[in-house]
């Protein structure tokens, strides 16, 4: 089989192409347990170094107690828009081996990033938007939820339905480096 | 809009559900430039903290000079199967600000993980399998390709077509923790 001969031009998947990070969510949009389960499953199935699965998630849905506790720890810019999202997920990386100071995996954060990417793309594929952010008090979240010291509270993801005509984070360019800028030492013209 | 009322049960996207890491690739499968471009674009479009895009890729296709140079630095288990893959991609994380010892982004490896996850899922969506691995000599790759010191050679991804009936890495379980094990403090039964 030669993919050189595939007559159809491959395209970037719509979930990847149309993904963006809305800064305004529909505050009436509700997502069901099964939607949340599907998103968590997508992260659960991500690959990781030696199948170490160095990830965990605190999941709050707008209106429940977990959500109310998470919202208390938002700071700065995220306070304006994140509470309106249907779901707030705290993303945790397992950084230490239990009861030691040994690194759990050199790929803890890399693999957490993979799991969260799986979750955001899964969400997009079923019509749910996502916006990751860092504007919250890590220590307060860790303390409030009794996060064991071998876990790092790394990031949060807001999931929901982008409000009509919602823009992206102001002041942050969405431009990307070109393909040539980020691929090094590449030969061309092989087929 | 309430996603509670969506009559269709959402499912995990096939690219996520069926993704696995083959340890045997079809050594005759060739992927075209446009397939490689599409995979790189998927990584290029990944989100990152403040749009910092802390990623770069060295792309070698079986038969070209870059591939031959990359293969020289494989060690151990990857030597058995990775050279057969159609494409070998070295994944690099920007860890330092140029000419300083300042951290470029606390999310460098997390965001590289996201970009690589985008690439592997994009590949799956167009019929190309992927296997990430660490069994290579990082320093030798960095030296051979003149990687600037602010970049870390982090991982590699082999892309190609899984050989018929190819299994997964032997000795590594594919089992995942359950959804309940990895979601903490979650309320249930909201809708």
Image (spheres, coloured by chain):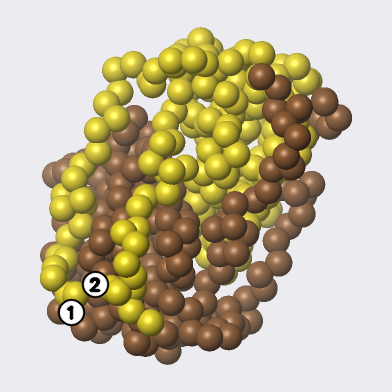
Chain colours: A yellow, B brown
Please tell me whether residue B106 is drawn above or below residue A71 in the rendered image.
below
The residue that mark 1 highlights is B64
Which quadrant of the rendered structure holds the N terminus of chain B?
A: top right
Residue marked by disc 2? B60
A144 sits left or right of A3 in the view = right
In the rendered image, is residue B21 in sight? yes
Q: Chain of mark 1?
A: B
Rendered view: A52 above or below A149:
below
Residue B117, percent from left and from top? 45, 54
For the residue carrying disc 2, how many other residues have a C-alpha within 10 Å: few (<14), some (14-19), or many (20+)?
Answer: many
Q: Residue at x 42, y 89 (%)?
A: B80
Q: CA distance from mark 1 to mark 2?
A: 7 Å
Check disc 1 and report its element: helix, strand or loop: loop
Mark 1, Cα crowd under 10 Å, few <14 / some 14-19 / many 20+, is some
**Pointer 1 and pointer 2: residues touching (CB < 8 Å)?**
yes
Q: Position of residue A127 (x, y in %)?
A: 57, 34
Same chain under badges 1 and 2? The reply is yes
């Amino acid at each position: 089989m030669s993919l050189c001969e595939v007559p159809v031009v491959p395209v970037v998947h719509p979930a990847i192409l149309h993904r963006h990070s809305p800064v305004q969510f529909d505050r009436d949009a509700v997502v069901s347990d099964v939607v949340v389960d599907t998103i968590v499953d997508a992260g659960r199935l991500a690959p990781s170094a030696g199948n170490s699965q160095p990830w965990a998630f605190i999941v709050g849905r707008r209106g429940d107690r977990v959500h109310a506790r998470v919202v208390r720890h938002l700071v700065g810019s995220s306070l304006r828009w994140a509470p309106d999202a249907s779901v707030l997920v705290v993303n945790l990386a397992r950084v230490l081996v239990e009861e030691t100071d040994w690194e759990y995996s050199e790929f803890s954060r890399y693999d957490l990033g993979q799991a969260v990417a799986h979750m955001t793309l899964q969400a997009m594929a079923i019509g749910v938007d996502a916006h990751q952010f860092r504007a919250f008090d890590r220590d307060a979240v860790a303390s409030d939820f009794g996060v064991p010291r071998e876990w790092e509270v790394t990031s949060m993801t807001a999931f929901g339905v982008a409000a009509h005509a919602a823009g992206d984070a102001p002041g942050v360019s969405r431009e990307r480096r070109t393909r040539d800028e980020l691929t090094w030492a590449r030969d061309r013209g092989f087929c």
